Amino acid sequence: MIVNRSGAERAAQARAAEAQLADDGIEGVVFGWVDNAGLTRVKSVPVGQLAHTAEFGVGAVPCFDYALVDDSFTSAASSTGPVGDLRLVPDLDRLTPLAAQPGWAWAPADRYTQAGSPHPGCQRGFARRAAEAVERRGLAVRAGIEIEWVVADAAGDPATTGPGFGMTRFIERSDYLRDVLRALTAQGLTVSQLHPEYAVGQFEVSVAAEEPVGAADTAMLVRHTVRAVSARHGLRVSYAPVFTEGALGNGGHLHLSLWRAGRNLGHGGSGPHGLHPEAEYFLAGALAELPALLALGAPGVASYLRLVPAHFAGAYRCWGHENREAALRLVTGSAAGQANAEFKCFDAAANPYLAVGGVLAAGLAGIDAGLPLPPETRGDPAALATAERLPMSLSEAADAFEKSALLRQALGRELYEAVLAVRRAEADLFAGCADAEVIGATRWQY
């Protein structure tokens, strides 16, 4: 991984890649990171500067750790405001020529201090530390994030008609969907499904599971690619939690499975629906921490306009086998390797590195505590008097996050403070706004 290589080693890797980049007609490399508001930020360099950038990085203003969805800024005790600088270093292990942007390649980036050490506020670094903690237990996690989006015309109106999952919608945009599929496949991704979703103008793509940091990288690449293909078709894309008031929103459902020695611990065990003890404890730990995890997986005020009952959004803190109204859906699949758990309460505004890292940290805490799952919810939780709603606003989720000693320790002081500051500031930003105003202000930000 990038953190185990010296600057000179990274530069050598970049120089070795330049010939292939030239053969592919690549003239520039764009690399990006996702901030604490869930917005993807990018910088780019000409190919001739790639080796220098791989060795030394390029400047990245630290105040973006405190950027809000409207590009205003907040602060916290550990922030430095306009003072200081970081170095943004591309991870060339994920260097990918972009099929929908000829002449460009892409790579995710890590952020370093000027002294060359990992920036404590780097979200990708947090996800890596969480994944390494899993590996130290002799465990492995396979993860994937579903990407949902609304495609709109130049006027901003949904660019399809017809029912959810409908043939009409698919046929209307079949050339567009073909180009999305072609681009993702050309970039080395294995597409599992691509189809119309429920809301008007909405589509979804799922790709093959991989290790946790790679899954978050891939989520960023998929979003980048879908947006680029859409632009070529004269279309706009929104990943916002809610595009239309009252309609189902854009989820960013995290799927994961826990493995040991090549065996999926979600299948063939003695626990509920075949869970092995470690998998049960892991999921119980994440479920117990879920109100606080929402500050990572449902990060905006608009997220809580999506997270409502009867929207397949997982608005209740419960789990169930194939239960799409439960926050944690257990998926057994038709084969041992397919068993996984789905976090339905997370949406497309989430920083994927924060969401993945937070769940891993909570899951390991569940293993350490030997925490069993509570009784399964077998029907619609809304019909049960004992059902527990997850936080119903960003302020409530931020309250739970602020009380979480587990996440405070896992993220580290600087990243924890930055996330909390952004959540509080965004709650204040939209205080008193009508739902329509919140949706209108965030529709095109994600």
Image (cartoon, rainbow, N blue to C red):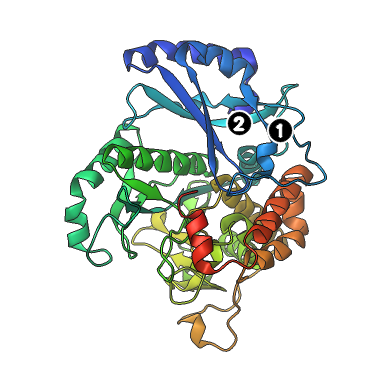
Where residue 316 sits: x, y (%)? 55, 74
- Quadrant including the N terminus: top right
Residue where numbered disc 1 is placed: 119
Instruction: Report the residue at 76% width, 52% height from top.
Output: 408
Q: Is residue 324 visible?
A: yes
Residues under labels 2 and 1: Cα distance? Answer: 8 Å
Q: Is disc 2 in contact with disc 1, using a CB cutoff of under 8 Å?
A: yes
Q: Relative to 416, is 325 on the left or the right?
A: left
Where residue 273 sits: x, y (%)? 47, 70
In the rendered view, tell whether residue 211 sits above or below residue 361.
above
Q: Is residue 275 visible?
A: no
Residue at the extreme bottom of the image, as rendered? 385
Mark 1 neighbour class, 10 Å CA radius: few under 14, some 14 to 19, many 20 or more: many
In the rendered view, tell whether residue 201 sits above or below residue 125.
below
**Between 397 and 255, the one nearer to me in the picture:** 397
Instruction: Report the residue at 37% width, 18% height from top.
Output: 26
What is the three-letter code of the residue carrying label 1? His
Q: Which mark, by number, is residue 110?
A: 2
**Between 330 and 426, the one nearer to me in the picture:** 426
Mark 2 neighbour class, 10 Å CA radius: few under 14, some 14 to 19, many 20 or more: many
Sequence-first disc among 2 and 1? 2
Q: Which mark, by number, is residue 161?
A: none
Instruction: Report the residue at 37% width, 14% height from top.
Output: 20
**Between 138 and 289, the one nearer to me in the picture:** 289
Instruction: Report the residue at 30% width, 32% height from top.
Output: 186
In the rendered view, tell whether residue 256 sits above or below residue 222.
below
What is the three-letter code of the residue carrying label 2? Asp
Q: Relative to 4, is 22 on the left or the right?
A: left
Quarter of image, res 420? bottom right
Where residue 47 sits: x, y (%)? 45, 14
